Amino acid sequence: MNLLLENELNGILMAVFEKNGLDKKFAFVKVSDRPDLSDFQCNGALALAKIAHKNPREIASLIAEELKKIDFIETISVDGPGFINIKLKNDFIAANTDKMAVDERLGCGEVEDKHKVVLDYGGPNVAKEMHVGHLRSGVIGESIRRIEKFVGNDVIADVHLGDWGTPMGMILAEIIKTDGNLDKVNSYDIAQITEFYKRANIHCKEDESAKESARKITAELQSGNSEYRKAWQHLRDESMKAIKENYEQLDVNFDLWWGESDAHETCGKVVKIAREKGLSEMDNGAEIIRLEESNKPKPPVIMVKSDGAFGYQLTDIATAKMRFDELAAEEIVYFTDSRQSLHFEQVFEVIDKLGIAPNVKLKHIVFGTVNGADGKPFKTRDGGVMNLDTLIEMSKDKVRQSLPKAGEIEGYGEKEIEKLTSQIAVAAIKFQDLKNTINSGYVFELDDFAKFEGKTGPYIQYAVARINSMLRKAKANGLDFGKVILQAPEERALALKLAQIHNVIMRAHNEKEPSIIADYAYNLAQIFSTFYNACPVMSAENGELAASRLTLAKLVRDVLTLMLYLLGIEAPQVMLKAENQG
Ligand code: ARG
């Protein structure tokens, strides 16, 4: 069930089309591009006329005549070459709004084909600092996790920790080089571990023998060298702690913390399956699978490197098998930037060839990079990689400028202000990211992203808090919610916008595109603001109107809160503004 107004119209159009022998494929309306003329329009007559070589206006008129009989339609007209413009009666829209206001799901339905989806996002690496790329993957993934759950799917989010590749050998080699052995490993914290990795990276770039020993150690680590495994376990544990803290701060959540290493055993099984099916071959000591080269050459997948180590692609292939065998996944969605497009094309093709995850829908959602003002990947002031901690701190500093100081407002001491600061700071970071379509990169806007005005997370949070404050006042004045009455055009426009929520969420789900929700939330907040200026609640002309407007305001509050939730953003009850913020 959903309370989308279009549904009613579509149902009627279906019947009309059927009765008149018209192709039902075109029996649907969309929200009008010309709100001055109509609420909805049906452009089906144009397509039908083309196929039947008829006059579109004639077909449109035939449909319009039938629609005129429907009692909840206010006006209907055929315009231009054959557009059918439909305006609904106010009472009808109002009744729909009333139903939304008391519905737990605010009028939103669920998907028909509920299924199990595994989401693979985050993908941070042991010993490496998380950068904005891991941030984007986490932020987008978390939003999709919430959207998928909300539409009724069974969702499992898995972090796919990078803990099994050459970087592991590199860092162990570096520690051995510095300390002579691995005895001190257990005393190293995450900062020290990261330093070792940075140095290892430099050495391996300059020095072929350093690279060679890193490769050797990786292979031995994977094949079970117990000393390496023990040291590796510490590196992994320390990194995991830091990663969990980071994602916790951002309210990015996972159901599973599987790493590449967890797929090790399955990697072995996959290699066997490939051999048995005759799909693999030896090439210079490495075991590879060649791929179809239909329109562009695709390099083969290296399953086992010549030194015996498993490749990055194999871990993904094996993990897909585990997600099918152990989690009963029906769909797996991966979130990374475009640099891994080829990787996933190769991985998907091999999974298909091997038949290890039959009928599982595999999807790679590619996102663009986060850039600085210079158009290059976002860096810190001194040119380093922007890590998550720095980013969050930066955002908090910005937010602090807009908030009163601890103690300035009664009931808001250090602790409360700090909590509010992080809620707003995280909203600012996430919204700035999610308001952009996923596959476009974006420029990290350093000045305005944390402001309380403009298309920002804090603006929407502020809109929610303002309504909360109004609801509290109304309650104190004994004003209750009442039946929705639509008189002013601003009330009508608001109710029509609210009625779109089901479609907005379904589109975000289908397209895996949180920006659809961000756009809608921003527009709704703006439309509410226009309504609120034109239609006072407390001082409305009469009690019924006041009660109606209160219902509308509460519904907007609930819808905006849900939208923020689906973006992974909290909606604080109260927002404070520093004196100078007006
Ligand atoms: N750890 C990888 C990286 O930092 C990202 C992992 C993406 N997910 C996956 N299933 N391969 O580049």
Image: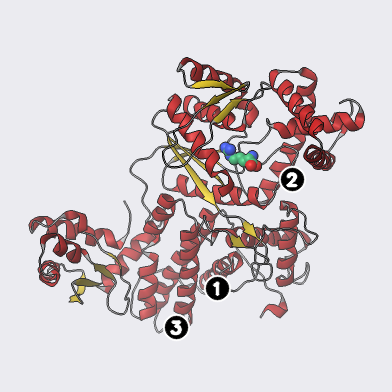
Residue at x 45%, y 36% (from the top left corner): 293
In the picture as drawn, the residue positioned furthest to the left comes out as 20
The type of residue carrying mark 1 is Lys
Asked if 256 appears above or below 380 in the picture, the reply is above
What amino acid does circle 3 point to?
Ala
Task: Decide: few, some or many residues near mark 3? Use Cα within 10 Å; few <14, some 14-19, many ≥20.
Answer: few
Q: Which residue is mark 2?
A: 129
Where in the image, quadrant-wise, is ligand 1 located? top right
Element type where label 3 sits in the image: helix
- The verdict on label 3 being within 8 Å of ligand 1 is no
The reply to whether callout 2 and callout 1 are in contact (CB within 8 Å) is no
Q: How crowded is the residue under tag 2: few (<14 C-alpha within 10 Å), some, or many (20+)?
A: many
Q: How many marks?
A: 3
Q: Which residue corresponds to mark 1?
A: 473
Percent of width and height locating residue 12 = 18, 60
Q: Callout 2, which amino acid? A: Glu
Q: Foreground mark, 2 or 3?
A: 2
Q: Report how far apart the C-alphas of labels 2 and 1 lie in the structure.
A: 47 Å
Q: Gap between marks 3 and 1, in whole Å?
A: 19 Å
